[in-house]
Amino acid sequence: MARKKTKRSSQARKSTGGTAPRMSLGSIGTGAQSGNKKRKLDTALDTESTQGNTNSTFDNGTGVEDEERLDYETHFAKLPVDAQPLKLESLAMVQLLIAGASQDLEIPYRTAVLCASAYVSGVVSVSDVLEHRLQSPWKEDLNLPSCPQPLLASTINFNLATEEGMTQYTQEMENLHQAVDSMGIERIVFCVVTHSDPVTGDLHFAPNGEGAERLEVVMGSLFSPESEDWLREKETYLFNLVCGSKLITANGYKHLQTYVTSKVFGNIFMFPTVHLQPHELTSFITNLLEHVLFRHQPVEPMIPIILKELAGLGVHTRILHLSLQSNSQDEQHCHAVRYVWTHRGRRPWGLDTPSYCNLCNSIKSFRGIERINNPDDSFSIQFKCHGPSCTKSVTIPLTAAESGLTQGPRDPYGKWQCHDFQWDQRLLERF
């Protein structure tokens, strides 16, 4: 005769927010009864379970002792990038700021320093390092996956209109050099923040618009040949935050290319737009630096990942990234990539849809968008006005570099696209 099944009754447990035993976080379910690997608990928190045995080992299936020294290359390098521990190293973040600039221009730099401070052992200034002869803490093992190091943060205001201003700037750059060497810093991030002339694109080098010069002249003064020499030995990043215009001359572009090919800067970022608002760049800069500097992820593959959530930035500006790459013959060259935000209605093929028709005085009336194939295998984009009885159209030829772009989705978030950039004055005028 089959045995009759009976229900077991148990008293319901209620969480009352009362007392609870102290234990190590994550320790529940790690015992033998759960079938998981045994976990060594903190002896200070659970003395009974260890019974004074402080020599227990961590069973990872290989019999490796808990006290084995971890090596980054051996234990972590083969893990997926997002699963690797942080490998923290000393870092310097420097802002070269035109004198008299408003505080809102400093938002990207200050936010980047604030975010980076969460990964470092402390934040020091150049004066702190030189006055107290500070040095980075000695590391017993350079391959340790996580060993916080100090962050050197410095803002240098420049006014190159006077001899006194140039002398002061030179001295501050020399002090920066000494502090970087004293701390043994190998990675430096520069943010150059200034204005530009809306007609010529010349960079301001003095406050209140007192003076401006070509990009290659101003940058050559900010980074002297002596500065270039010691920067070549470092891992360097340059963010050009220039407000006022989006013009750049062929000579200015060649100057930036030379910075890359001569290894003064490993990565250069530009944000060419008519009225750049630096605070719009905050999320992009801070997120990129976090993934590259603290998670050691490659720069170029990370850019589209970060931009995916930044449609607002795409409406505001395009991005130009210069870096050093090697071809199949191992010859190094400057590789430039242009990032544009596209949307079927607002930014088809990366072009700004005309917002105003000067023939019928209609606003946002260019709703007819058509791609035209030209006899020379190039193509143009034609915008047609749908205003009252209006026949006006605007045709913009696309360059060969833009041939791989698509019109873009209708989704409100649009889509970031990129293409290799080659110097083309037509493209620069509407960058």
Image: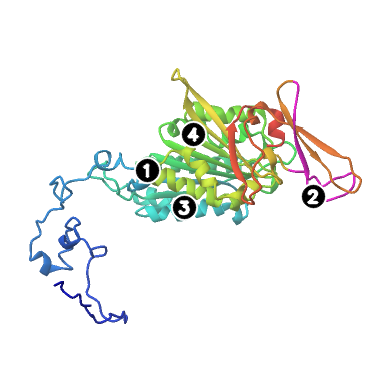
Q: CA distance from mark 4 to mark 1?
A: 25 Å
Residue identified by numbered label 3: 113
Dot 1: element: helix
Q: SS for tag 3?
A: helix
Q: Which residue is mark 1?
A: 81
Q: Relative to 290, is 400 above or below?
A: above
Q: Which badge, 3 or 2, comes first in the chain's sequence?
A: 3
Crowding near the residue tagged with mark 2, few <14, some 14–19, many ≥20 C-alpha atoms within 10 Å: some
Q: Which residue is mark 2?
A: 364
Whole-angstrom CA distance, mark 2 to mark 4, is 42 Å
- Residue at x 55%, y 51% (from the top left corner): 282
Mark 4: secondary structure: loop
Looking at numbered disc 1 in the image, what kind of residue is underneath it? Val
Left or right position of 298 against 208: left
The part of the chain drawn in magenta is: 353-375
Badge 2 amino acid? Lys
Indicate yes or no whether the magenta region holds residue 20. Answer: no
One can see residue 210 in this view: no
Residue pointed to by mark 4: 265
Residue 366 on the magenta segment: yes
